[in-house]
Amino acid sequence: MSTTIQNKTKMVERPRFSWGWVLVLFLLVTSNSLMAQAGGANTNAFNFNIGMNLPEEPQRIDVAIRILFLITLLAVAPSLVMLMTCFTRIIIVFSFLRNALSLQGVPANQILVGFALFMTFFIMQPVYQRIDAEAIKPYSAGAITGGQALDISKGHAKDFMLRQARPKDVEFFVGLSKMGPTKVEELPMTVVIPGFVLSELRTGFQMGFLLFIPFILIDFVVAIVLMSLGLLFLPPVTISMPLKILLFVLVDGWTLIVRSLALSFGL
């Protein structure tokens, strides 16, 4: 019995001979010899030329760099829309509102983001009009260069962000960058944008907290009533959510929130 087990173990441990490797080696040797006979060509079958052939003309290199820059700009355009406009504050308030109403998927994320984008276009319309009148149209007419148009557009965007940002937040990033005393007009975008985003986050959370207060009171009252009635196994959300939706609709909550958001930007 033990001899049989040992024989089986030896049979299992015996290495198997694979004909696949022999076939691969045969094909490699054959292809190499055929290439050598094909007219004095290079016999190294595995000489792959991996690289990038850059054009010798400087004009073509400049065009390639501009195309690469344009593709990169298009890739980061959504981030620029979110960070340099009022989109951040609006979407934060909408998210707080949905959580305060105890609604996880209503309205859907696509609806909230789309509505926030259209509100962003509406609130930023004066800035866009000034950029179009002073930068885009003169550049299209050939009155100014592309660099001048970019500087004018950047100046209008910077003015909007500085009006909405708290001076304390901008000074915080100025101190981190160790720039020293600097005029407001000379502040770089690398300092203005983080300060503006920090102010938008703070303002959005403040407005979200104010939205939570009436709905928290409704949850508190419903929980006390259910405890007094002895309905301990009934979730308070089941009763409070319809009441919160009813209160929100009766006071025309969406109009109040949109009006408050628009007025918070000085419209």
Image (spheres, helix red, strand yellow):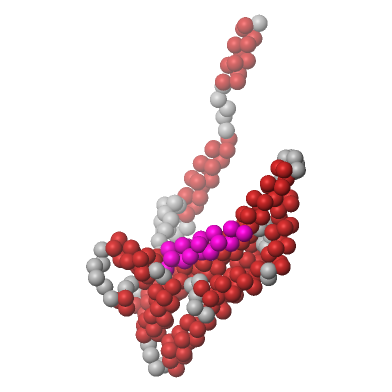
Res 54 visible: no
- Seen in the image, is 201 located left or right of residue 108? left
- Toward the front, the furthest residue is 228
Residue at image coords 60%, 70%? 257
Percent position (x, y) of residue 133? 46, 90
- Seen in the image, is 144 located left or right of residue 100? left
Q: Is 128 in front, or is 25?
A: 128
| Tag count | 0
- Toward the left, the furthest residue is 180
Residue 262 in the magenta stretch? The answer is: no
12 vs 133: above or below: above
**Which stretch appears magenta?**
196-214
Please identify the dominant SS of the magenta region: helix
Residue at image coords 43%, 56%? 48
Q: Is 55 in front, or is 119?
A: 119
Q: Quadrant of the N terminus?
A: top right
Res 17 visible: yes
- Toward the top, the furthest residue is 1
Residue 205 in the magenta stretch? The answer is: yes
Percent position (x, y) of residue 35? 47, 54
Residue at image coords 39%, 83%? 152
Percent position (x, y) of residue 28? 50, 46
Percent position (x, y) of residue 89? 52, 67
- Seen in the image, is 74 located left or right of residue 194? right
Q: Is 163 in front, or is 194?
A: 163
- Seen in the image, is 250 located left or right of residue 211? right
Residue at image coords 53%, 76%? 263
Residue 215: which quarter of the image? Answer: bottom right
